[in-house]
Image (cartoon, rainbow, N blue to C red):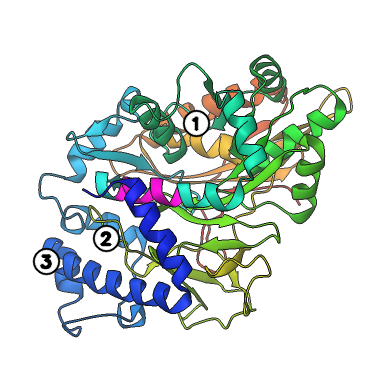
Amino acid sequence: MTSALALFRDGRRTLRQGPEALAQRQRERLAAMVDFARSRSPYYRELYRSLPERVEDPALLPVTRKPNLMAHFDDWVTDPEVTIDRVQAFIADPRRAGERFLGRYLVTTTSGTTGHRGLFLLDDRAAAVVRALSLRAAGRTLTPMVTARLLAHRGRSAHIVATGGHLAAYSVIIRTRAAGRLPARGSRVLSVHSPLPELVDQLNRQRPVFLAGYATVIALLAGEQLAGRLRISPAVVSLLAEGVSDRDHERIRSAFGAHLINTYGCNESLALAYGCPFGWLHVHSDWLILEPVDADHRPTPPGQESLSVLLTSLCRWAQPILRYDLGDSVLLRPDACPCGDPLPAIRVRGRAADLLSFPRGDGGTVRIVPMAFETLLERIPGIDLFQIVQTAPTCLRVRLRSAAAADADQLWTAVRKEMAGLLTAHGAGQVSVERAHEPPEQSPGGKYRVVIPWS
């Protein structure tokens, strides 16, 4: 297997050769991945039976979606030893997060933000590519001065993520620690479910030089820093997964005075793009393809916001991700980015998460990030689909669709108990949690918003 360092060096040479070399590498890897999927995945063998022998244009491929792939999981995967029953038995134990399934795969689950839970496998070859792309992002975003400060403090870090299950960020951190690439002694993993005062206290004691977390959580912490309750001076603040408004981006920068790193990733492709000083995200186009599209999956012109984007990963061998409807709205820059990076530049419009705000009895406000609710309900077995709607400042309405074998009343009792506990822990115990009789509803674009704030 090629090492991450060798892949990093190869990618650096390709970037130096310019856009045509990038495009050629993309075409070669697409053709190889389609061939691999056809030969190893029964699902793709049937789906691609009428396609040309060699495919170098992703537009020739039919669109795939998470619900359909999950419904055909055993035929989708390329390893016959992997079955959905075995994977589900593995993830049923949250203590196994970060362990190697069958001794060779990292298993991650989605938080259900598109309405359907996904199970994803990362093999060692794909993990090496992810590490190489992370090295690329660090090399193109970190200055020598910032790097020196990180090294001087031995990379003392704090990572604020959803814990207690097999969600990607948490599982990757646990796996990275086990492999010795992240020192357990100098790094701390903090739970996004923790009340804000607890997070502030933990961070004040840890004093991280590297702070990473979901963008909405970091935005909340920026307010605490500006108010003087949080007193840390990180060299780097890394914003994970979600979008963040320009206003919050500037607020975070001014609050911490740190080097900001924006990254764009998902379970289907842990490293999609990285940010530049001009506010754009540069796509790793030698290892993946992003196609902005409209409602009919027709190309959206550069400079216009798409309804969705189709993802083709060129390094997901265990579960080929080919022309996969990711659901995010993106805008592709029509010209060269002024930062000089040759990789395509995009802005993501469809992943900015809205905070849920609740009034306190003393006149203040409690703010909770949607991820806290999403990951909480993901841990409850028997939920097929859910949606939380804030119908009033102090009322949450929960729409549930239970799995076929689940008892709906018992499921609701568990949901109400968990949500009430979370609200109470955050000082919002007065908020009522109602059971909806209507099912979760889709937006006009076909996606589910799992958490819908009061407007």
Q: Position of residue 105 (x, y in %)?
A: 24, 40
Pointers 1 and 2 in contact (C-beta within 8 Å): no
- Residue 89: image quadrant is top left
Q: Tell me which residue sits at (76%, 52%) in the image.
A: 455
The quadrant in which residue 98 appears is: top left
Give whichever of 371, 71 is nearer the camera: 371
Decide if residue 420 is in sight here. no
Q: Residue furthest right?
A: 363
Using the image as rendered, state which of residue 233 and residue 172 is in the foreground.
233
Residues drawn in magenta: 126-134
Q: Nearer the viewer, residue 293 or 368?
A: 293
> Percent x, y for residue 18?
48, 74
- Kindly identify the amino acid type of the residue bearing the numbered disc 3: Ser
Query: In this rendering, is residue 45 above or below 68?
Result: below
Tell me the kind of residue under disc 1: Val
Q: CA distance from mark 1 to mark 2?
A: 34 Å
Q: Is residue 256 above or below residue 246?
A: above
- Which disc, if any, is residue 39? 3
Q: Is residue 128 magenta?
A: yes
Q: Which residue is mark 2?
A: 320
Secondary structure beneath dot 3 equals helix
Distance of label 1 from label 3 (alpha carbons): 43 Å
Whether pointer 2 and pointer 3 mark residues with C-beta atoms closer than 8 Å, the reply is no
Q: Amino acid at mark 2?
A: Pro
Q: Which residue is mark 1?
A: 415
* Tag 1 and tag 3, C-beta contact below 8 Å: no
Residue 17 figure quarter: bottom left
Query: Which one is in front, 260 or 48?
Result: 260
Q: From the viewer's perspective, is 55 left or right of 213?
A: left
Label the magenta part by its dominant secondary structure.
helix
Q: Is residue 28 above or below residue 234?
A: below
